[in-house]
Amino acid sequence: MSKTVVLAGGGTGGHVYPALAMGDALIEQGHQIKYMGDAGRLEGRVVPERGIDFIPIPAVQYPRGGILSKFKFAWGLFRAILFSRRALKKMNADFVLGVGGYISAPPVLAAWTLGIPRAVHEANVTPGLANRLCARVADLVLLTYAQTEERLPGNAPCETVGCPVNPRVLTGVRDEAAQRYGIDASVPTMLVVGGSLGAATINEIAMACARNEERGYQIIHVTGPKYHADIEKQLLPLPAGVVLVDYENRMQDAYAAADLVVCRAGSSTLAELTAAGKASVLVPSPNVTDNHQEGNARGLEDVGAAVVVIEKDLDMADTVAQIGVLLGDSERLKTMAENARQEGHLDTAERVSQILSGHFFG
């Protein structure tokens, strides 16, 4: 029987894209998908582009200030929950799946007050604040990593499923992607991406590589909208073999064209790298809870799929040289890519949809 399933959360690609992968799998099962999130963040742009009904809700980000800020937050959260209650009742929601990010809390808490079944998915080893709150009222918690269970409050049953990836990431064709980017498919190519919002350190590495006069490889640099204009200004005229993209909504092309990926180490990014079977240089973000990205990255390094560069220890000249050596060693890249592929899982979203059907949609 078809159900109305509401996805809730977002802010970054690490929340939004796994949510959409799960949504696609649920659509395949015949369910109707709605999405509640912040209209001013990534989900407000990409969800409507997918043809999914998007319901913007008032943003309530947890403050770092004093008592007054926390009071304003509590009032804002209360209002967002009331708004979410009205929206869920209006759409006759049958189920709510929170995917993390502060904006996921109001719909999940509203579902709890209405008696609507609800679950949360946590993409990282260390759960975020919203999921720590929502886990207390969830009927089911879906985990990427088994060790996350001991870090969550509440008594909800947990299932370790991994991080969902949209199979679309495998549909790129190298020659077609190279033609789209205006590069040579026969020349080694580095993809640099700092996540959906971009990352300053990743961009600095990309620019240093672009300026390297001895570079024997091409660069596709996804800058992030926030940084694009400044990077373009700094690099103009663009060195040969360098392509700048502010935001890429066809990552299947970027992966298809790439022999090596330089990026952060969020769970959703690593899930895509392993599914696509791509060698990588990982620069874990230092601005995350419990330094969980370094733990993610070391896991791929341990199996020979990645090289890890720690931001605080970054030596730019050494890093540029190391990237050049990697891109000049096709056999090592091939081995790293195969090691990555051995860690990949493309069936996570489908498994989630089956689990939800077994628990809630029978």
Image (spheres, grey):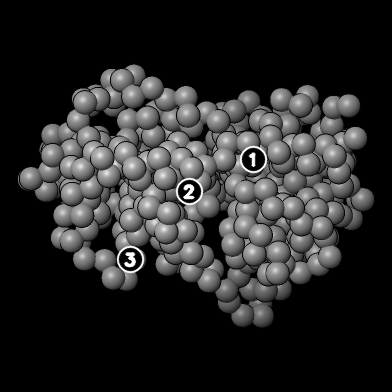
Tell me: 251 left or right of 105. left
Nearer-the-camera pick, 229 or 30: 30
- On the image, the x and y values in percent for residue 174 come to 34, 24
Question: Which secondary structure lies at badge 3?
Answer: helix
Of the residues under marks 1 and 2, which one precedes in the sequence? 2
Tell me: 352 left or right of 289. right
| Label 3: how many Cα within 10 Å (few below 14, some 14–19, many 20+) | some
Using the image, determine if residue 288 lies above or below residue 16: below
| Label 2: how many Cα within 10 Å (few below 14, some 14–19, many 20+) | many
Measure the alpha-carbon separation of dots 2 and 3. 18 Å
- On the image, the x and y values in percent for residue 165 come to 57, 39
Measure the alpha-carbon separation of dots 1 and 2. 14 Å
* Amino acid residing under circle 3: Glu
Of the numbered discs in the image, which one, if any, rests on residue 270?
2
Of the residues under marks 2 and 3, which one precedes in the sequence? 2
* Amino acid residing under circle 1: Thr
Identity of the residue drawn at 77% across and 36% down:
354
Using the image, determine if residue 178 lies above or below residue 268: above
